[in-house]
Image (cartoon, grey):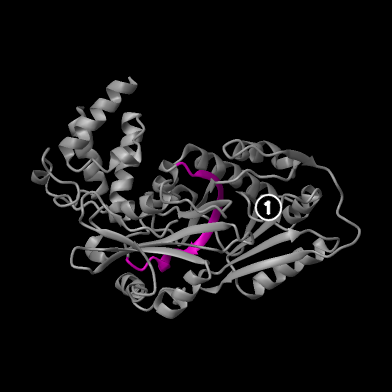
Amino acid sequence: MLHKVDFLPDELFRIVAVDKTNTHHVGTVFRSVYGEDFPVKDVYQPETLWKEIQARRLVSALAFDEKGQAAGYISMFKTAPNPRLWEAGNILVTPEYTHTNISSRLVHHYFDPAMCKMTDIDGIFNETVCCHFFTQVSAAKIGMIDCGLELDQLDGDSFKDGKSNKAGTARVSCVLYFWELTDPLEPEYVPIRYDTILRKIAGSLRPRILFPSTDALPTDGSTTLEEKYYAYAKTWKVAVPIIGSDWIEVVENILYKGRERRVISLQVTLNMACPHIGVAVDLLREKGFFFGGMAPRWFGTDGLLMQRLLESETEYEKTKLYKPFSRELLAFIRTDREAVRGI
Amino acid sequence: MTTMEKVYEIILKLKKKNISLEALKPEASLVDDLMLDSLDFAEMLVIAEDVFSIEIPMEDAVNLTTIGAAVEYFDKRIAAQG
């Protein structure tokens, strides 16, 4: 399990799992960087954190220095519709230890195969920011696969330390990195227009069966949605496990509500188990949505990420991308975005 | 340009020339003397991989503690891949 104490070789820091006895140190780490302004307030609430850990919705670790002071934090939590997926994130180091390799040590703590022996897990994903290289390099070098690119997902001003938005962009895009730990079992469907790029992404993951999607929308049945709205980031993520006969109205409602909420980044992830995903994508493109990538195992089966930006022009040239394939994805996405503008 | 000179150039670029030239010496610690934080360090790896056309595994990266150690490592990788 992840809950293992790890004394680092240089013995400067001690990394331990967060438990009931040390949850109060998590808030200390976040306050040192964000004051009281970190948007996810749970990090300041020891009891809430402990409940999340007990419910197995959160696993996290703290780094302590020789004096026993909290020096860093890392966590994994559940945000995808598939409860067997974990998101890795919230790597944080207190200001006095930024000039150390503690963040690398924290990343290694989680992704060392000897540590990560959870069995009820399809994979781990990480949304790595594109305003610096650190998390992209860390993810790539431990073997995670770049599968998607979420344009302008975060507010550039939210990087409160004033240093980590090295690109200095108004909005910050994220590369979706994925580490797949079980084999996918069900066949899936790909829109013909995205066949090549999706097969290229899938080629770096475990083997899966992909068919071209040629079915029409169903004549009955309702669309189902699961949504996460991040008001502070002006980002709205909508997962679509089932695409029903009402798809056109659903898309129009999503757009209407997105504008009403003054959302900037609107992301719709479609279940690739739907044989009619191709026509659903065509309808999204008619409404200005463009390709984002694959969200592996998002529903147990894979997700196809489509995105639309309301009120944002991406600063493409300042987007920092480490892997060549990430740059290829950006080029593809940029072309697709231009194409849907002409529809 | 030697590997050492190229590494100096990379560090000057990272620190946006906000560093004294006397600080650039083989024994200088990247973290303690040159004050590279984790974000700078990652950027250094990315630039070095590009400049020297090498790949740097993470387990090797943690050993790049000084300019001299980095230069020695880069030269070995260049020779091995060359």
Q: Nearer the viewer, residue A180 or A29?
A: A180
Which three-letter amino acid code belongs to the residue tagged 1?
Arg
* Magenta part of the chain: A143-161
Q: Relative to residue A49, is residue A325 depicted above or below?
A: above
Specify whether B39 is left or right of A259.
Answer: left
Tag count: 1
Specify whether B67 is left or right of B50.
Answer: left
Q: Nearer the viewer, residue A222 or A48?
A: A48
Q: Nearer the viewer, residue B58 or A17?
A: A17
Q: Position of residue A173 (x, y in %)?
A: 50, 55
The verdict on residue A157 being magenta is: yes
For image coordinates 81% across by 50% down, the residue present is: A276
* SS label for mark 1: helix
Q: Position of residue B36 (x, y in %)?
A: 23, 51
Q: Which residue bears the numbered disc 1?
A: A341
Question: Pointer 1: residues within 10 angstroms few (<14), some, or many (20+)?
Answer: few
For image coordinates 15% across by 52% down, the residue present is: B32
Q: Position of residue A285 (x, y in %)?
A: 73, 53
Q: From the image, which quarter does the N terminus of chain A lie in? A: bottom left
Residue A62 shows up from this direction: yes
Query: Image quadrant of residue B65?
Result: top left
Q: Position of residue A25 (x, y in %)?
A: 32, 73
